[in-house]
Amino acid sequence: MIHLKGHAALVTGSTKGVGRAIAKALAEAGANVVIHGRNPGADATSIVQECRDTGVVAEFITGDLSEPTENVVEPLFQKALEKMPAIDILVNNAGTYIDKPYLEMDLDTYQRTMRLNVASPYFLTQSFARHWVQNNTAGRVLLIGSINGRLAEPIHTCYDASKGAIEMMVKSLCVALAPHGIRVNGLAPGLVSTPLTAIIEEDPQFKQWMCLHTPNGEVPGPEVCGEGAVYLVSDAARHVHGHMLLIDGGMSGWQQPDMPAE
């Protein structure tokens, strides 16, 4: 049985959606957890309590990772260590899905997306890696990508580019940090039902279309990502480096989905 007893994790963007599901799964596996969100509130309070109910230590910190990277990453790193000095797992989950058609894209939206989805995980990982190397800690890093890092959508060019960057970051940080005993892997969900993808439930035809384009025919909740995350940061995956695990119901492997049956 895979467990994470004796470990501690920071999960960015973990008050909702995929990050919340991952934080809860890590706690259920025995890891102490630092929850992160932009602001305190009911969502933060409830996930902290859910984690504590599993018997682990859980704390909460704030920080807006879409702000200029030089202003937010180091303070967030310090806050996390103050709450839980023994952190040896970093899950870079915070991200945004805000996008515009390419011909309407503006620099502010582009930069905000890239700061949150690319720059913040890159430099937050650097802060933890330096700390781990200095303290001879075998750290584990998990970067959360997306099916959009493999398959493009015409109205999500900026988001797609940011998640494509995560795909290569998993590989490049792997080869940079593996010699220091730090493992880097990634997890890429397909379409899952979260607050960021609320249109799925609001538009039955869209949901039907997405199910048609997914081999197992499902648009699940974010909990499907939890166990994969636990595996990738556990000792069971000690020889897994630079790998992107797609949790997508087979969507990434289906070149030409079938037409709906009459």
Image (cartoon, helix red, strand yellow):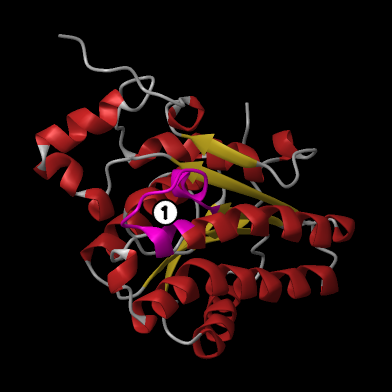
Q: Is residue 63 visible?
A: no
Q: Is residue 222 above or below residue 130?
A: above
Rendered-image quadrant of the C terminus = top left
Q: Amino acid type of disc 1? A: Gly
Q: Is residue 17 covered in magenta?
A: no
When asked about the image quadrant of residue 49, the answer is bottom left
Rendered-image quadrant of the N terminus = top right
Q: Toward the viewer: 70 or 77?
A: 70
Provide the secondary structure element on which disc 1 rests: helix
Q: Is residue 60 visible?
A: yes
Left or right: residue 84 versus residue 64 is right
Identify the residue at the far top of this view.
Answer: 262
Q: Residue at x 33, y 73 (%)?
A: 105
Q: Residue at x 66, y 56 (%)?
A: 168
Q: Is residue 259 above or below residue 148?
A: above
Q: Position of residue 159 (x, y in %)?
A: 41, 61
Left or right: residue 254 versus residue 106 is right
Which residue is the site of mark 1? Answer: 19
Q: Position of residue 96 (x, y in %)?
A: 37, 64
Q: Is residue 157 covered in magenta?
A: yes
Left or right: residue 90 versus residue 248 is right
Magenta highlight range: 144-160
When asked about the image quadrant of residue 218, the answer is top left
